[in-house]
Image: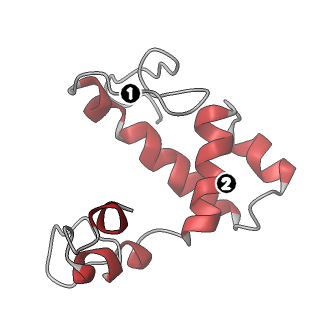
Amino acid sequence: WRNEIAGRAIIPTNVLTKPPSAELKPDQRDDQSLPDYEILDLILRAYVEGDHTVAEILAMNITGADPETVQRVCRLVDIAEFKRRQTPLGTRVTGKAFGRDRRVPIINRYRE
């Protein structure tokens, strides 16, 4: 979008076409540790915006993902909660956002 508006490559094409990555180590890509984005989006939408539990997401069968994947994605959301408390609130772009709309305890061993 930015390049189209400017009429030139403000953002280099290789940045826009390379596979998504947290870039924490060489040759790391998101697809090596996460499900396809189509499935990931469905899980996150149900878990974060829909306030559904893992069991409810599995019962709805909306993702086509195996139970281990759904559990792992939801656990990743939960264990990263403390990171969302360390940053200032951002702009809300969905019906439900992290922060004030979603409160999860961040104490040790909450999920054990």
Determine which of the numbered discs, if any, sits on residue 42 in the image: 2
Quarter of the figure that contains the N terminus: bottom left
Q: 24 left or right of 63?
A: left
Q: How many numbered discs?
A: 2
Image point (69%, 36%), residue name? 53
Q: Position of residue 92 (x, y in %)?
A: 46, 27
Q: Is residue 23 above or below residue 102?
A: below
Q: Quadrant of residue 77?
A: top left
Q: Is residue 20 above or below residue 81?
A: below
Residue type, numbered disc 2: Leu
Of mark 1 and mark 2, the one earlier in the sequence is 2
Q: Given the current orientation, which residue lies at the most extreme front position?
A: 7
Q: Is residue 56 above or below residue 21?
A: above
Q: Is residue 105 above or below residue 21?
A: above
Q: In this view of the protein, which residue sits in the foreground, 9 or 22?
A: 9
Query: For mark 1, what is the residue?
Result: 91
Tell which tag, 1 or 2, sits nearer the viewer: 1
Residue type, numbered disc 1: Thr
Q: Secondary structure under badge 2? A: helix
Label 2 packing within 10 angstroms: few (<14), some (14-19), many (20+): some
The colour scheme used here is secondary structure
Gap between marks 1 and 2 measured at Cα: 21 Å
